[in-house]
Amino acid sequence: MPINEYAAFLSEIKEVIKHTDLEYTFRMAYGGDVLPGQFFEVSIPKFGEAPISVSGIEDGIIDLTIRRVGKVTNEIFERYEGESLFMRGPYGNGFNLADYYGKELVIIAGGTGVSPVRAVVDHFANNPDVVKTMTFIAGFKTPNDILFRSDFERWSKTAGVTLTVDDAKGEPGYNIGLVTEYIPKLKVRDAASAAAIVVGPPAMMRFTTMGLLKFGFKEENIQISHERRMCCGIGKCGHCKINDVYVCLDGPIFSLSKAKALLD
Amino acid sequence: MDINTKKLKKNAFRVTKRRGLTASRVRVPGGHLKTEYMDIIRRIADEYGDGTVHITARQGFEIPGIRFEDMQIVNELLQPVIDGMRINQPEPGKGYSSSGTRNIAACVGNRVCPFACYDTTAFAQRIEKAVFPNDLHFKIALTGCPNDCQKVRMHDFGIMGMTLPQYERDRCVTCRACINFCKKKSVEALKEINYRPSRNEEKCIGCGECVLNCPMSAWTRSKEKYYRLTLFGRTGKRNPRLGEDFIKWIDEDSIVKIILNTYEYVEKYIDRGAPGGKEHIGYIVDRTGFEEYKAWALKGVELPAIAEVNQTVYWGGVKY
Amino acid sequence: MGYKLTPEAFSRIVAGLSERYRVFAPKRYELGGHFSDTDIIRYGEISAGSEIIFGEKSAQSFKEALLPITQVLFYFTEKEMKESDFEQKDVLVFLRSCDLNAVKRLDTIYLRNGEEDYYYKRVRDRIRFALIGCPEPFESCFCVDMGTNRANNYDFGVVEQDGTYFVDCKAKDLADLFSAGTQEVQIPPLFVSKTKTRVNIPEELDASVATASMWEEYDGRCINCGRCNFSCPTCTCYTMQDIFYQENGRVGERRRVWASCMVDGFSDVAGGGSYRPKNGQRMRFKTLHKVLDYRARFGENMCVGCGRCDDVCPEYISFSRIINRLSEAMEEVRNADK
């Protein structure tokens, strides 16, 4: 008999990290192969499945940073350490880390867009020698929305890290402004050969990639991640189709040269 | 000139404002006719009338300007129209044998209209067959769906088509068309439970919007046809009012039976001293009480199990 | 060459087959139409050949035989998931050439685009096809221009002519059924080679046509009911649904139901995002999927020209006309670029 791709396995919640009221990271037991940027269909029977991207990878553990936005994620937030979630995956292409080896790498993320790139940033922060340089610019709305706060301190020891908020709400000690404002100040020697990853809300990605192109980055060296409704994760249900691509199979990571041709 | 106006009226002619001239009233049960009959009506109007015809409020034709002495020849000319519309006639060649029970009117119905839940004309013709040539003053109208384009609530018997929606859950794809249309165009009888519509049976008026708008045929019409029967709406001088619901989810046979029962009831209770011996049924019911009427109306009627009978009915309207 | 059968003989043979197979065919559902006193022709299980409707096109396609409209994938309790059962009986589907070509499109999505679909595969492995021959095209058919007026991967084909049934049997194991007591005769053609409705997909068609003005017309005309998708033999989209039963809240099912890219909610993402709010945008998305995107990915058009979407549209929007407007639309877009 063929394999039933829709069959989910139970994975134990090892730890729950609360970032904000709306964003928790669930550290899940998982021993299989997985790439940063890939996603799992996470489910609770009765409430349904939701595609959640991998925000951290360790031995036997993957992190799923979940924003509470709907029926399924509301229910997931009611689950505690020691309980389990149903999962299937991983799906999608993910970030191939070797692609960035030896390059100047710029990663720009906005809001929950930080989750899918976190494992990439983490990898190169831990292995700074495999890239020429890594610069990470992350933007959040307010200080209350900041995810992975402790990671930022650690990463800044080995990489150029900029954390900015749209509005500091009066709290001192924050950079204020959009991520795009930091693009002209990037310390990149050869933009034409440098690699960039941009993940965030659609408008943020649009303006950020425009800024990078202006800076001299090449379309084919910029990668973005598309968020679409990925219902089956395996190229059948059609919800995530754009032009001739299926985001769940061919993405969610696309080079800008491919992504710019995609029209919903 | 010596004319028996009582006989003339019963023969479906009219006393008009112009002395010596009458008008012939042609019954068209269900308001739908073959055009060949219009040729005859035209000929009568051209040769014996004044070359005009009035389309009446009850979907008949009134041919004015006919001289009293031409009534018999007009009756003879009308014979194919009377035969063609299968009007009961005790004596061929003598025109219509009564006029009290008015032409049975109907909206265009499902011969044309997508909303209609039945063939209004066919049912009108069936009722015509059952009640004519009764001369009591009854007004009956049929409409295909609860939109009531025929305004049947202004009649003694208002018949409104309904369908009992049938739901096949496995054909449903949660497009929500039924729920949205029921909410926007009808009575909001559907709500979503577990991705599927759930029908409030009490609220549902059987309009069929769910069926019409279901792209999957998950909703279909019941094989049985159902109706809402409204009673004793009327226009007129004293107390015009809308007909009120009597029975919801009634069947065709029961409606015919109730109308026939009502003729017996009226025969018994009508005020013989009323002008012209005519009295609207509604005023009779006002006098005897609805309970008494209901007992007569439902005599021998076997309603479908689903039928909902209103135990008491109150009418409003304008009282002068 | 093939066999000539009386309606009775044909009906009996199909009745016999229905004991071994679940037989799906276009059949008449009396009073099943949207409007009162109307019938509908659509697919359903049959138990005799006399139930098959040859002379009319079905409003919906055969695809529910392979892809049930609602299909339960799992039954579950709070802690366990159990795969749904399925009927262990082979399936025989009567279908026309356009639809048989559509099977290939379904196979492509369900077996080759990503991992094999387990639920599709388990039926697909047990299915056989009986071709319904088309003596004449219907008014809205445009199979010839889509290259789908012919097919050969059927087990037997049957065409009705003046009340007689002619069978072309390819499957060796079924030949005895038809040959018993009859002689081989020349049979009429199973396929049409001309249609009244013609389409022309411009060679230069590309995604830039999205900016053409023609789509705006459908913002107002289309009512996004989804009938075009649901009647389409090649539409493959579905949506997952989890429910717990109302009667017993501790057990439930995970199921999938057909979905339509024309209907509200298709592209909604958690948190409120949504794409293609306008009906014209949805029309463009659907059109390009059928005659461009799928071809770019898999090498042939998805649309098989059955014309059902034209037949069922309550707003009289013709898909074949949309295809035929694309040349002009491309020209408009190119001129705008100059």
Image (cartoon, grey):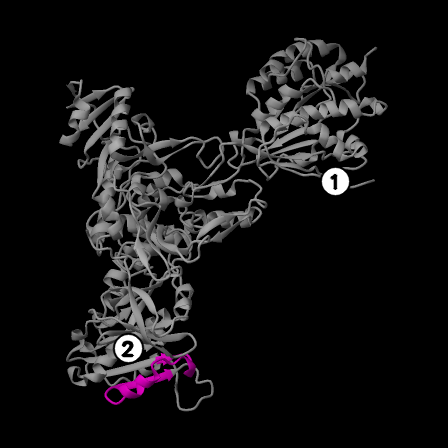
Q: Residue at x 58, y 26 (%)?
A: B123
In the picture of the structure, the residue carrying the numbered disc 1 is: B315
Decide if residue C121 is on the left or right side of residue B49. Answer: left
Residue B267 coordinates in the image, percent (x, y)? 77, 22
Q: Categorize mark 2 by other alpha carbons within 10 Å: few (<14), some (14-19), many (20+).
A: many
Disc 1 to disc 2, how far (Cα)?
73 Å
Q: Image height check: is B232 above or below A222? A: above
Residue B109 coordinates in the image, percent (x, y)? 55, 31
Quadrant containing the N terminus of chain B is: top right
On the same chain, marks 1 and 2? The answer is no
Task: Count all numbered tags in the image, as a single digit.
Answer: 2
Q: Nearer the viewer, residue A173 or C9?
A: C9
Q: Image height check: is B7 above or below A39? A: above
Q: Image height check: is C167 above or below A12? A: above
In the picture of the structure, the residue carrying the numbered disc 2 is: A118
Q: Which residue type does callout 1 highlight?
A: Trp
Q: Nearer the viewer, residue A104 or B222?
A: B222
Q: Categorize mark 1 by other alpha carbons within 10 Å: few (<14), some (14-19), many (20+).
A: some
Q: Which residue type does callout 2 highlight?
A: Arg
- Helix, strand or loop at mark 1: loop
Decide if residue A239 is on the left or right side of residue B314. Answer: left
Label disc, if present, on residue B147 of the rendered structure: none
* Residue A133 shown in magenta: no
User: Which chain letter matches label 1?
Assistant: B
User: Which chain letter matches label 2?
Assistant: A
Residue B311 coordinates in the image, percent (x, y)? 69, 38
Q: Residue at x 22, y 23 (%)?
A: C166
In the rendered structure, which segment of residues is drawn in magenta?
A139-164
Can I make out residue C76 in this image?
A: yes
* Residue A156 shown in magenta: yes
- Helix, strand or loop at mark 2: helix
